[in-house]
Image (cartoon, rainbow, N blue to C red):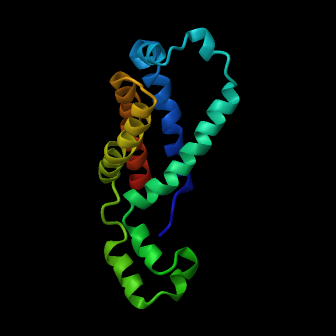
């Protein structure tokens, strides 16, 4: 199973692109700033190279796990010990991959799994942390919505093109 690294690099850009829109003051940015007691001036004092650079690195980390969640063939690949052991796998593995190697490898299918990851993983994690931090439901829904959209798009890109 070949992986397209360009698709993974592109999927990692999604968090930056969606964040640019999502947290824009004309969308949810003003509400988000108010819920965090932040001002526009305070936000401009951050080290943007560090923030955007680490965001991209963390997003690349997310693509690795999303690949396993959205591309079902990675499970079959794991059963033989991963890419280094494909050549020594039993003939049944090659037959399975010939029959099902591209099954469910679509943007739509990946987007579904990405959406489910956002709804059933990111949302609860954000919710739990936010409740203990005494954050509002607005805060929770803004962040959870962001991650649901990002993971949906990332899952689609990874499954459809990686």
Is 30 on the left or on the right of 60, as rendered? left
Q: Position of residue 129 (x, y in %)?
A: 44, 37
Asked whether the viewer can see residue 162, the reply is: no
Q: Quadrant of residue 21?
A: top left
Asked whether the viewer can see residue 82, the reply is: yes
> Which of these two is toward me, 55 or 111?
55
- In this rendering, the answer to whether 71 lies above or below 28 is below
Q: Quadrant of residue 44?
A: top right
Q: Looking at the image, which residue is at 50% across and 66% down?
A: 2
Q: Position of residue 30 (x, y in %)?
A: 44, 12
Q: Position of residue 7 (x, y in %)?
A: 50, 50
> Which of these two is toward me, 74 or 146?
146
- In this rendering, the answer to whether 87 lies above or below 131 is below
Q: Looking at the image, which residue is at 53% across and 32% down?
A: 16
Q: Looking at the image, which residue is at 30% across and 61% down?
A: 104
- The number of callouts visible is 0
Q: Quadrant of residue 43?
A: top right
- In this rendering, the answer to whether 7 lies above or below 137 is below
Q: Looking at the image, which residue is at 31% across and 66% down?
A: 103
- In this rendering, the answer to whether 92 lies above or below 21 is below
Q: Position of residue 140 (x, y in %)?
A: 37, 29
């Amino acid at each position: 199973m070949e992986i397209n690294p360009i698709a993974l690099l592109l999927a990692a850009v999604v968090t930056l692109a969606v964040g640019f829109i999502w947290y824009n003051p004309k969308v949810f940015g003003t509400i988000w700033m108010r819920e965090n007691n932040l001002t526009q001036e305070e936000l401009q004092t951050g080290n943007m190279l560090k923030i955007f650079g680490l965001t991209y690195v963390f997003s690349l980390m997310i693509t690795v796990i999303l690949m396993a969640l959205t591309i079902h063939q990675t499970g079959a690949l794991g059963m033989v010990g991963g890419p280094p052991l494909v050549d020594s796998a039993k003939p049944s593995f090659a037959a399975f991959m010939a029959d099902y190697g591209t099954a469910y490898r679509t943007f739509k299918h990946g987007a579904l799994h990405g959406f489910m990851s956002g709804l059933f993983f990111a949302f609860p994690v954000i919710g739990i942390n936010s409740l203990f931090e005494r954050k509002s439901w607005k805060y929770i829904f803004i962040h959870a919505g962001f991650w649901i959209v990002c993971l949906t798009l990332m899952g689609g890109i990874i499954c459809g093109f990686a």
